[in-house]
Amino acid sequence: MASLNVRAAVVSITFLILVLGMWEMSAQAPEAETAMTEYERLMGGADQESRVPPPSKVIALAWEELSNPFYDAGANDKGIGIQLAYSIYRVLTGYLAAMAIALPVGFLIGMSPLMYKALNPYIQVLRPISPLAWMPLALFIIQDSDASAIFVIFICSIWPMLLNTAFGVANVREDWINVARTHELGPLRTALTVILPAAAPTILTGMRISIGIAWLVIVAAEMLVGGTGIGYYVWNEWNNLDLASVIFSILMIGVVGMVLDLILGRAQRLVEYKE
Amino acid sequence: MSKSFLEVDGLSKVYPDGQGGDLTVFEDIRFSLEKGEFVCIIGHSGCGKSTILNVLAGLDEATEGNLVMNGKEVKGPSLERGVVFQNYSLFPWKSALKNITFAVQARWPSWSKEQVREHSERYLKMVGLDHAMHRKPSQLSGGMRQRVSIARAFATQPELLLLDEPFGALDALTRGVIQDELVKIWEETRQTVFMITHDVDEAILLSDRIFLMSNGPNARIAESVSVDMPHPRARATIFQNPSYHKVRDYLVDFLVNRSSTALPEKDGTPKVISPAGGDSAPTPDDDSQSASPAHAVNA
């Protein structure tokens, strides 16, 4: 009996072939039953109905795009690598800015019941706001579409990090704090050597949720602000009616999102501990 | 004012009882400890033993009363008072050794890395865990964890060691083994120890004196029982000593029959009892040797 991994791989691949096969068949244009008229031939084919491109076409396009991902042929024709790089740059900038605020503020809220009670109402009101709702205000205040997109990433990734940090810090076991106290550790050393490692798994969980949300939001944000980025690319290809490119970029969004999540998953495993 | 190492004077703790009134857990707790003494405190649950220990540690505050150690008032936690908690309280993300170097580093910030490591390893060895020093607490059994915790407390060589039912969560066999470890390490270091226990035999094996608490609320330390048996004591042979049974019978009688009514002397100090009939002066036999907490550092 093959190992579970091998069997799972077999099922996975069978499933993929089945789905691609069905897709390929359904996406073929039906054979014209009668000869095309002159007019139809002039119009480029008998089929008036537009169809989703078959996977073979998408794969061919993917091959072409991925073999030269960084070409730059003007504003509306850049390689997929460049578009993804723009998106990743925006996500990371907004995300790191959110981290710089969320971690210290989360610590403060977690350690001080007063600050928790004082700030909690604001957090509860601001948190459920769709990050895109901030876009007009951001555009008006910042007056720069690129910075506005980064701001939207910032505002959407701050909440999970903030709340998880506060929760993790507030729930550090009393005994560990007492150990720090009986060893005369100052507040800063207690925070860094006891509370931070104790709360790190919870904090990393928040960071992982945040990066996921940030990657979801960047696509929508870039569709709005335009110019560059994978979100803009998807929308632009839709305007070009190039559905193969749309499908290809959807897949690429998934792949990059998965990689970001994997990286944070690794980091999470590094700080995890068993009690 | 006497010149004992630790003077506890009129300690009491009052909590709101949740119905608008007050609940006095214990009151007018008075006792003193001498340098190098091993003292256990026994009492039924709810008499506030742990609170007394936490007050001594500086982790909790008494409602009333004074605490003077070495002529200085005790305020807040300090490295001079080490604590071993019942649930070990090791940092699970640090290895056994790192849990100890953390404490040693905090105690002597000027020490070099090698010095800290060497000192920490020596104490791990004392509890027989040098083979497991790189393991995380989750990879250690409960008994091993508590040994690391004990090693950590002894390694910082505090003036006073506070043990809060350190063996409460261990099975009887493991408990016996670690009691032996504790006897050994205490014989080597002669730290002043104040320990909470529920186990009468454990108290007799380890202590010079045993404090008996009456039941809460309004609990007091009613009696101070001298255990006049020479150190070192061995778990396997201690019951052959005739004093052992007298002390044990006395303690059990107190806990079963008298703990709800027992009272201290009129001046609030515990009644000094010596069930074995020895003279009641509770000085440990080699007090002089224990008076230098630094000797183990240079060893």
Image (cartoon, grey):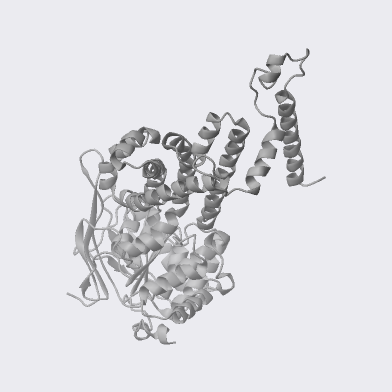
Q: Position of residue B215 (x, y in %)?
A: 32, 52
Q: Is residue B56 above or below residue B189?
A: above
Residue plotted at (38% across, 76% down): B157
Q: Name the one closer to the observer, A104 or B266.
A: A104
* Residue A91 seen by the camera: yes
Q: Seen in the image, is A70 located left or right of residue B241?
A: right
* Residue B277 seen by the camera: no
Question: Image quadrant for the N terminus of chain B?
Answer: bottom left
Q: Name the one closer to the observer, B188 or A151.
A: A151
Q: Position of residue A245 (x, y in %)?
A: 60, 35
Residue plotted at (25% across, 42% down): A118
Residue plotted at (28% across, 58% down): B60
Q: Is residue B249 above or below residue A22?
A: below
Q: Seen in the image, is B236 located left or right of residue B119?
A: right
Please tell me in which quadrant of the rendered image residue A30 appears.
top right
Q: Position of residue B41 (x, y in %)?
A: 36, 63
